Amino acid sequence: MPEEVLEQARDEMLDWHGAGMSVMEMSHRGKEFMSIAAMAEADLRELLAIPAHYKVLFLQGGATSQFSMVPQNLLGEKESADYIYTGQWSKKAIAEAGKFCRVNVAASSEDRKFTYVPQRESWRLDPAAAYVHVTSNETIGGVEYQWTPDVGEVPLVADMSSHLLSRPVDIEQYGVIYAGAQKNVGPAGLTIVIIREDLIGRAPPGTAAMADYKTHADSDSMYNTPPTYAIYVAGLVFQWLKRLGGLGAIEKINIAKAKLLYEYLDSTGFYDCPVAVADRSRMNVPFRIKDDTLDAEFLAQSKQQGLVQLKGHRSVGGMRASIYNAMPIEGVRTLVEFMREFERSHG
């Protein structure tokens, strides 16, 4: 979280704008919170240039809930969907979709341990598929699409949980974009769905109300009590991004941060980054010490320097530096300097 956002939330904790109460105490249908939600949506629409014929939904359940909501809402009368398999999160999405339809894995990077994005010309898309699903940034593996797939008239669906708001996005190239908030947007508990309006209302009879996009679209995300405080803090993040100059400005910062770390990793034989250069994530940078017996010492010493949560996911091991929007470039410089010193003393 950006420090100034945390400070503003602290200052407004007990009394939001003279309302005499915290946002956490507000009725979600009261005029105070309704104004917060409306401003948050307006700012998000401005940041992403979301067209009027797309709905913005503020939901709960994390991106994981969307693994089942997407097929329930988009299949219609079709029986299959295309998925691109690039890592742990697309694997989970594929498994969940398989409960509702036939899943065609149109391309996979499993052959090289999910260290790249399969080139578009290698995809074996089914023209009868209801949609094409991609995980556009694999948090665990550090693989990110640096291009938007052209899938023709079939709706493109993207899980953008770990890089939404880190760069501009051409919304009209997608049918659905969804993201858990807890990377670049705000606290855990909020899930954002951006959906083209013609894709709403396709859920079959008998679909649970909470699993139907139409339920939430028709009630402006107020069908049940939404995650009010998470929406409020997300709204503060949107305003912070606007003050920075928008997504074009934060993208330049993110490019500079990623370049600083990747250039160091590429300059040394002590560490190794396994991800294909063209597909490296700006948000999540996995790396290994070539002598993995040093991993525990690296993590212990980095923690002493205030560099925390660098341990890689248990499924891949090694290290992972997540350098989301709120991480200042000074933090990346500090990490690189520590890595240099560790190499000097252990290389």
Image (spheres, rainbow, N blue to C red):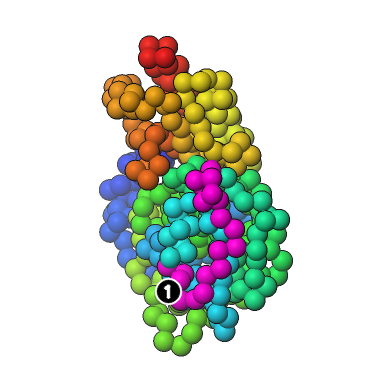
Q: Nearer the viewer, residue 162 or 310?
A: 310
Inspect this view and state whether residue 113 appears. Answer: yes
Where residue 329 appears, x then y in whole percent? Answer: 50, 27
Q: Residue at x 55, y 63 (%)?
A: 105
Query: What amino acid type is highlighted by mark number 1?
Result: Lys
In the rendered image, the quadrant that contains the C terminus is top left
Q: Nearer the viewer, residue 21 or 104?
A: 104
Where residue 87 appears, x then y in whole percent? Answer: 48, 51
Residue at far front of view: 111
Where residue 204 appears, x then y in whole percent? Answer: 48, 85
Above-or-below relation of 84 to 333: below
Above-or-below relation of 341 to 259: above
Q: Nearer the viewer, residue 67 or 292?
A: 292
Q: Is residue 64 left or right of residue 278?
A: left
Residue bearing mark 1:
99
Residues drawn in magenta: 96-115
Inspect this view and state whether residue 197 appears. Answer: no
Dot 1 surroundings within 10 Å: few (below 14), some, or many (20 or more)?
Answer: few
Q: Is residue 296 left or right of residue 77?
A: left
Where residue 312 appears, x then y in whole percent? Answer: 38, 38
Q: Residue 156, located in which quarter of the rendered image?
A: bottom right
Q: Nearer the viewer, residue 58 or 261?
A: 261
Whether residue 134 appears in magenta in the rendering, the answer is: no
Q: Residue at x 71, y 56 (%)?
A: 121
Above-or-below relation of 26 to 98: above
Q: Is residue 15 left or right of residue 204?
A: left
Residue at far bottom of view: 205
In the rendered image, the quadrant that contains the N terminus is top left
Q: Helix, strand or loop at disc 1?
A: loop
